[in-house]
Image (cartoon, coloured by chain):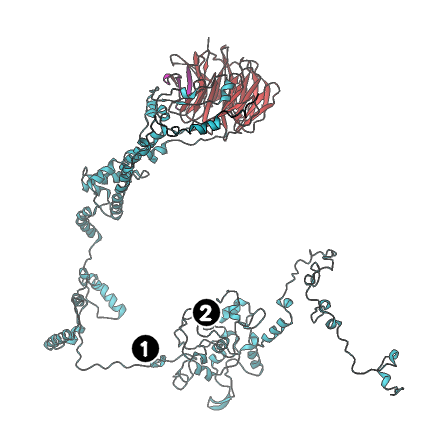
Chain colours: A cyan, B red
Amino acid sequence: MSRKRPLSTAQHASPSLVDSLFLGTPIADADQNSFAPVWRQEARDERGRKRFHGAFTGGFSAGYFNTVGSKEGWTPSAFKSSRTERAEKKTLRPEDFMDEEDLADQLADERLVAAAPFSAISEPSSSKGAEAGLQDILRGAPPGAESVGYELLKKMGWKPGFGIGPLKSQVVAGRKVMMPPRADEAALSGVRLERKNNKHGLGYDSEVPSIESNEPTESARRALLAPGTISSKKNTGFGVGVVNEYEDGDDEEDPYEIKPIAYDRVLGSKKQKPLSGVSKHVFVSKTKTKSHSAGAITTSKLRRCHDGRLPISGFVLVIGGSLATSSMLTNEKAYTLPSIPDSYVPGILIMRDPKTVVTPQLIADFEKSRKSSSSARSSSIYHQQHLSAAERSRILGSAQDHLQGKSIFDYMTPAQRERFAKATGNQNLPPAKSEVGPTLSEAGHDSGHRNEAALLELIPTLDKHQASTALSAGFMPYADDHEKRARYIAYLESQSGSRPVSHLLTFMKSGDSDTTAGKLKVEDWMRELKEFNKAAGLFRPLKGMLANRFTSSANAATTKTSVVEDDNTVLLQGAGQGKGATDREDVSAAKLGMYGPLTRRVSAWAPSSLLCKRFGVRVPNMSAVDVSGEPEELKASARERLDLLSHRKLLTIAKDADVDEEVTKRLESQTMDSGDGSKINVEVNEALEQKKAPRDLFLAVFGDSDGEDERD
Amino acid sequence: MPFPVYSRNAPLKEHVGPVHVVTYNTTGQYILSGGQDRKIILWNPNSSKVVKSYIAHGYEVLDIAVSYDNSKFVSCGGDRTIYLWDVTSGSTVRRFSGHMSRVNTVDFNADASVVASGSYDAKVRLWDTKSSSQRPIQLLEEAKDSISSLQVVGSQIITGSVDGYVRVYDLRMGQVFEDLIGSPVTSVKDSTDGACVLVSTLDSTIRLMDKSNGTMLQSFKGHLNKEYRIRSCFGDNDVYVISGSEDGKVYAWDMLSGRMVHELKGHGEKVISCVAYHPKNPQMVSCGTDGSIQVWDYT
């Protein structure tokens, strides 16, 4: 045990603790938080901000933490006018809401891409192809914006018009000179004229993910896109989860969507790249582009122009011959024609009846017959090749017989034919016959006479009885068109026999030249007649009871039912009578001026007692009121009578309206029990005639007791 | 007595807009008139001076009836309410409301204890002036269309409706007599002896109907009445039948013969909506849509 320690060991201790011994490493000044009990520990994030605001601990913080004001809540602060600073919009960027995690994700997504001027070398003016240039102009790109590569080339001594590459020795004016290579316009221009080998539509975009069914996984997706392209869909990023495709809230991708079949998928397509044009930010040499496009066509096969230059990439020079036969234009394989056997004789087997079964026997017979005929005619093939159209149509049995094989040349004059021949250069036109075609008027007249009889037959017929009932119906349709109504009536009359049917033809225009007003064209006339035919079935007169229940609108239209108030005065316009198709008795009597019993109606009316008191009259005895006429009947056995009446009325209505037979039978079978049945025997009343209680009981209840109830 | 044919004084032009109703009081000393301008004016017809104005209505005034003692009168109009006025004080004593549309006509009974009102809503309401009840004593609902005119005579209530019927409600007998006239009825007036009813209709005819059996006793034609409510009345103890017209003339017929005896021009071609005859003297008053009230005298 050493009492005195050397000074060196006591160096670490604080001056006040010189004598104390230190063993072990002192506890680092850890935050007191972790050693406090749980309920005292405070949750803070790495920036020192408090997490889990007041609500969790049971306190009220009034939105203070991380938001506004103070512990006590919103603290009023001095008003700062934004009148002058209104234009300043505090735009919040997504970055403001991100935490570290999100920011890290965002960084991970960033890629370095060459900006537009740097992305590809292209000549300024020539590269502006139709679309690309237009787009740039619309975007407001300054004219003459050139790619940086172009600028660099120029700075290094390159001039537009030259190719790119080492100087080549060429013979110019008899001397060997080193010259820059010949320019290939296509190499510098952004326009790539590439052959379209696929069968997509012109605007097809393989990157559009609408048609995708087989490979929803990300890796496959990436594989489908050409390497080096920027994925247009951000697979990672703020707000995008792992399985990003289906988290967009059904904007674009519905996980349950049944996508249409993608027809452009090829087996083993994972390794293939889409064939759409891809802009590469690498300068592409001439040969490579050629090999990508146009498939089988290599440089060696191309023909050159007269000056030795190659045609523009994507184009093939074709000299002579017909385009169609140039196999160079198609990648397709040329298939040879099938070999025709020597014994083949061209001919047609026409079957009159398509239902005949084609048996080998039939074919053999046909062949035999043909062969026999062909031997007769030496130049049968030749002959058949020179069948005229008329003969062919005749053989085929075509329906256009009426044309009778006339051609336009029949109607032309020779002079006109010569003009045709000169224009087409074809002297083999049929001879001109200068016929006169059928004129309209002739056709019209002929058809008119021919068709009148036919038209009369086409008029729809109506049953005579039906027509006459329709005529007698109270209501005639077409109230707004009197002419039409007249025609309808004429039709009905013609069908009921009172008018000749040919009279109906007077309503029809006799030809195109007939411009009489009121007459109809043939089609309209025919259509109208059919309409009348149908209408006649509808507008039948109502019978019996039903007629009383329905009123025609014609009567209603004539009555004035409105009460109109003028600015200044009170007008009273009344409803005219017009109830029902037939006037009631009293109405007609009033019309005639025969006022009296017919127009008078007396009914019972009970004044209230207070009213009578006020008027100073005695309240009348209503039961004694003798009211003549219907009301009396109503009082006596009113209900029964009503039932009877209604039943009878029902029956008559049913019968009139041609109601289903069963229903009427059922109605009839309903015995009028309400009226006749339940006969009441006046003599006997069961309720009263019951056996009286036995006398003992009677006395016990009501009899004298021993003075119990006696009172003074 | 001679018929008053002279319009001595200038017409009274206090109203603004058409005058719908004009009536004498029971003595004939005063006239009450009501018009589109919502005012009721009490006049002295002889001096042509305005005595009092009664202003309370919210809408036009369509009818006025004076009580038997001239102390009260009742008025009705477009505001669906019936106002009971006190003549001298000029204030509204009571208001009866309950009608669902404008009230076209109103009348007192003999002792002014009951007010009968007929409305566009086809109902007649009988109100009690003695009690303070808000509801009518009785409702007469037989009519199918607007009640254009009514009169309470003794123990009978005569109503004329646009549905073409004249209905006489007899309290004593407990019956209602419905007479079909044919055209919309615009005015009903009982005769002095109570035996017949003068009915004006929209077919330019005035008919005198017998109350007992509903027959027509006489008809009067010559005036024009096709659209508006024109009222007619008896004159000179039922000797004459007087009516306004839509052509601006006052017509008078002899009741017994039906012959037109007078055609008086006034109110400048405008509709003469109401005429009233003095209870005793040969004097009458007419009012029209031109806003003027004309007093006619026999000298």
Q: Quadrant of the N terminus of chain A?
A: bottom right
Residue named by callout 1: A324
Residue B214 shown in magenta: yes
Instruction: Give amino acid for label 1.
Output: Ala
Same chain for labels 2 and 1? Say yes or no: yes
Instruction: Give amino acid for label 2.
Output: Ser
- Relative horizontal placement of residue A197, taking residue A358 as reference (left or right): right
Return the chain for callout 1.
Answer: A
Q: Residue at x 62, y 74 (%)?
A: A104
Q: Pick the residue in front: A624 or A353.
A: A624
- Relative horizontal placement of residue A431, taking residue A636 as reference (left or right): left
Magenta residues? B194-216
Residue named by callout 2: A210
Q: Position of residue A649 (x, y in %)?
A: 30, 33
Q: Pick the residue in front: B33 or A392.
A: B33
Q: Pick the residue in front: A429 or A708.
A: A708
Q: Secondary structure at mark 1?
A: helix
- Relative horizontal placement of residue A227, taking residue A62 as reference (left or right): left
Q: Residue furthest front?
A: A706
- The residue carrying pointer 2 sits among few (fewer than 14), some (14 to 19) or many (20 or more) residues within 10 Å by Cα, namely few
Q: Residue furthest right?
A: A4
